[in-house]
Amino acid sequence: MSVRVRFAPSPTGFLHVGNVRTALFNWLFARRHAGAFILRIEDTDAARSERHFEEALCRDLRWLGLDWDEGVQVGGEHGPYRQTDRYALYTDQATRLLEQGAAYHCFCPAEELEQERQKRLEAGLQPGYSGKCRRLDPTQAGQRVESGEAAVLRLRVRSGKVGFEDLVFGPVEFDCEQIEDFVLRRSDGSPQYNFAVVVDDIGMKISHVIRGEGHLSNTPRQILVYEALGQPPPHFAHLSTILGPDGAKLSKRHGATSIDEFREAGFVPEALINYLALLGWSPEEEGREILSPADLCREFDLKRVNRSPAVFDPEKLRWVNRSHLRARSAAELVDLVVPSLRRRGWIDQVTSEIRDWLESLIEGLRKYLETVEDLAAAAEVIFDFRPERDLHNTQVQEVLREDHAVETIRAFQRALDEETALTPETYRAAVKAAQKATGARGKRLYHPIRVALTGRSSGPELDRLVEIVEGARQLPLPAPVPPVRKRVELVLELLP
RNA sequence: GGCCCCAUCGUCUAGGGGACCAGGACGCCGGCCUCUCACGCCGGAAACACGGGUUCGAAUCCCGUUGGGGCUACCA
């Protein structure tokens, strides 16, 4: 039997970490078994569903590299793939169940049922539906519906047990006594979730339903629908919940959880995928943590999925991101960082000279970084030279208070005087001259020079820094990057 | 309330009767490297929720307790 899985989000918000993990495991399972990954939109909740969320969902999934073989935006032979476009299908099946007597009309008003529910709950009784309309004569019920009376369609739930073998949780069994005659179709004609899902999964020939653990208790209901429809249920695999640091289900109040936020914060898709895969799954080879999407597709196995809920750890995500960032070439990193640099107003047009220069800049900065945004922020040392602001920093002040610190900078400046463009050689010669003049060496030599060049007490290696700064001389940047001599001059002006 | 699920370092996890006084990773702490912050390298602290069984032997199997989560909707 061929593997067909689906990811079926509701377009009621942006794609978030929990959903992506579900999408990812479906996708990995499909890729691993050369099956099909289907994207279905569950938009039967008219009040909360919005089309722009659907588009954002698709965009984010694509950005992550989770491509789908059938579904919204790509089509396929088992469509339509949006539930609101499938109402005729639900009606057909509902009619069938009604005719077979597997389902019946219920005329009880929602408010009345709700009151009843509350009363039972307060009395410590089971809150289910009483089954009041269950014994109504079908012909009479039909006439009432015919005459325009509002009615929902309920499934006539059988007695006995419903069991299934969950691919993650193992054997699970429910007693039908616990399941009321639930609604299949609302009085406005729209399908209820448990019904629509089953009709769709049958229609789309889904072989494995892989979804959040929250649906574990819905599964027996759905199996009952399969039975009523005379279809064999698919395999089920439920995935544990992702929690926030406080142990509650991960949500917005825990900070960034939506994919677009992570993208903007400078995370790369392969890192997000990698980290999320490790949340609840582990590769067979112990200790391997950095895995490419291709590795994951090759190795993913539902048997190795953990049952217990996992806490989302942004710190570890950052570490994973750094590892993947390192694997990207400088040229790729340029593409990633350019938007951030633009946003900061540091660059504008990217000519081929600027590209080359950015590559060298990134080489100098890359090992500091966990995210693309960090990379952009680190470039501040180059683009945003403001000694009048930075010299007040305590650590910088400490450097300047050292004996001969200012003298060293002066000597360094004098050694630069006659030069036009600084090369690595002339730079080193200037450093040497400063050393000779004041006798400072090591820390006491390089720290003041660093301050003179950046206004700061920390940053990239000085050799590289000089090369980057001097390399910017002729570039058409929105604001000029002051060359070494200019920097030293400005710093000295501010010193006593 | 009823039903279902879960429980190994702070966090993600390995483990599924003897290989475990529990291994790896993130984070944390210390050291080395070094002009600085990082990176890198080396080292360290840190866990089987609790109580009963079963067994020669339990992190591992069973029962209970506690704690967390889910379902019990004309939400998905």
Image (tube, coloured by chain):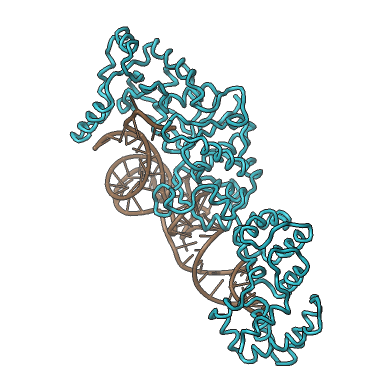
Residue located 44% across and 49% down the image: A252
Total marks drawn?
0
On screen, A331 above or below A273?
A: below
Quarter-wise, where is residue A136 in the image?
Answer: top left
Q: Which chain is cyan?
A: A
Quarter-wise, where is residue A113 in the image?
Answer: top left
Front-most of residues A93 and A111: A111
x and y percentages locating residue A271 in the rendered image: 60, 51
For the N terminus of chain A, the image quarter is top right
Q: Which chain is brown?
A: B
x and y percentages locating residue A48 in the rendered image: 43, 36
On screen, A200 above or below A18?
A: above
Front-most of residues B56 and A492: A492
x and y percentages locating residue A334 in the rendered image: 70, 57
Residue located 50% across and 46% down the image: A17
x and y percentages locating residue A29 in the rendered image: 58, 36
Front-most of residues A305 and A418: A418
On screen, A279 above or below A104?
A: below
